[in-house]
Image: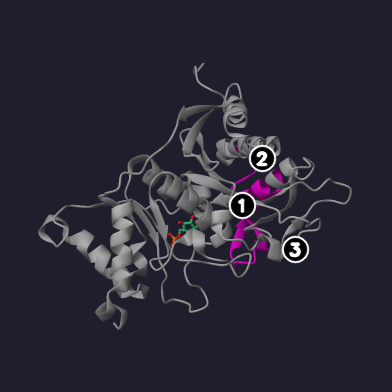
Amino acid sequence: MFNGLTLAAFLQEEQRLHGLSPDLAGVVEDMARAIKQIAHHVSQGALGDVLGSTDAVNIQGEVQKKLDVEANDIILRCHESSGRVAAMASEEMDSIYLLPIGERRGDYLLVFDPLDGSTNIDINLSIGTIFSILPCPRGVNEPREIDFLQPGRNQVCAGYAIYSQATVLVLTLGRGVHSFTLDRQIGEFFLVQRDLRIAPQGHEYAINTSNWRFWEPPIRRYIEECHAGETGPRGKNFNMRWMGAMVADCHRVLSRGGVFLYPRDLRDPNKPGKLRQLYEANPIALLTEQAGGVASTGRRSILDLMPQTLHQRIPVILGAREEVRLIEDYHLDPPLQSM
Ligand code: AHG
Ligand code: MN
Ligand code: MN
């Protein structure tokens, strides 16, 4: 057995040393319980009844996979009777989820992407779960959608699980980023790395280049310069990786550096990006900043932006500080703005 701190012991330490609220610790433990259940389903693969699609389409216009729905239900069930959350919202539900009548409402709002990287489910590649915990505004007993519309800076906890060779939980409570690996046999998460840091410079990038023709000039410029490698203006070679699951691509950035981009593109003027602010961009942005990186739309810090709707989309550029700052500089370049 791995001889490290369990997640429960880590959360107790946070309460003792940093005054972490027991209720917030409880929400994290409930989330970890949900993640273990989802990990079990994922690990069944074709032997479980979790592959393939349902007949339903979510509010994003995407066909829901069986595992999208199953993971969503698991997370709801793990939190709705805890007395610690006041309401929940997710990628797979059109509007917010109010607790069943009679359940005590707690102090937190939970927002999540139950299954990130859905197109990877049926081909046995990495997928994940992303979550964000916000304070429920004071005096609000019956939360409404507007109560969820808070900037990412308000998050009191953010994290994700990646279901891969191992199930890994990465989280921040606002004091650094810590990573836990699930011991499947005994069902416990163990702390394996404290204080993950993203190196300020990077030489690896992740972007879906099939969208090239829709990108704005600053993004084309940055990627063109990466392609040019040591013979171009950057004077160094870059490597490219794209897993097609934000969790997996950002886990690589948190683990070994580089940048992740899902920028604004011109495919649909109503969609200023693909990723959703509340349950994809914000939690990963907080983790990135807590690890010493930068998370930006190209023009502003992601965490400062006020979401307008529950399923708001937003451009995402995050990772190595100097790379993201350079991309932001390109967005300020006037000749390019007019192209
Ligand atoms: P989800 O499966 O939750 O809908 O999210 C998919 C997102 C994100 O995880 C990933 O980075 C991106 O979509 C992949 O987009 P492409 O299909 O353009 O590769
Ligand atoms: Mn997602
Ligand atoms: Mn999803």
Residue lying farthest bottom? Answer: 338
* CA neighbours of label 1 inside 10 A, class few (<14), some (14 to 19), many (20+): many
**Would you say 85 lies left or right of 193 here?**
right
Based on the picture, tell me whether residue 52 belongs to the magenta stretch.
yes
* CA neighbours of label 3 inside 10 A, class few (<14), some (14 to 19), many (20+): some
Numbered range of the magenta stretch: 47-74
Q: Secondary structure at mark 3?
A: loop
Give the residue type at disc 2: Leu
Give the residue type at disc 3: Arg
- Check whether the beta carbons of the residues at disc 1 and disc 2 lie within 8 A of each other: no
- Mark 3 lies on residue: 144
**Would you say 289 lies left or right of 67 here?**
left
Q: Tell me residue 183's x, y (percent).
A: 54, 25
- Mark 2 lies on residue: 24
Q: Residue at x 40, y 51 (%)?
A: 243
The quarter of the picture where the C terminus appears is bottom left
Question: Tag 3 or tag 2, which sits nearer the N-term?
Answer: 2
Q: Tell me residue 43's x, y (percent).
A: 56, 36
Question: Marks 1/3: CA distance?
Answer: 16 Å
- Mark 1 lies on residue: 112
Question: Marks 2/3: CA distance?
Answer: 21 Å
**Would you say 232 lies left or right of 97 here?**
left
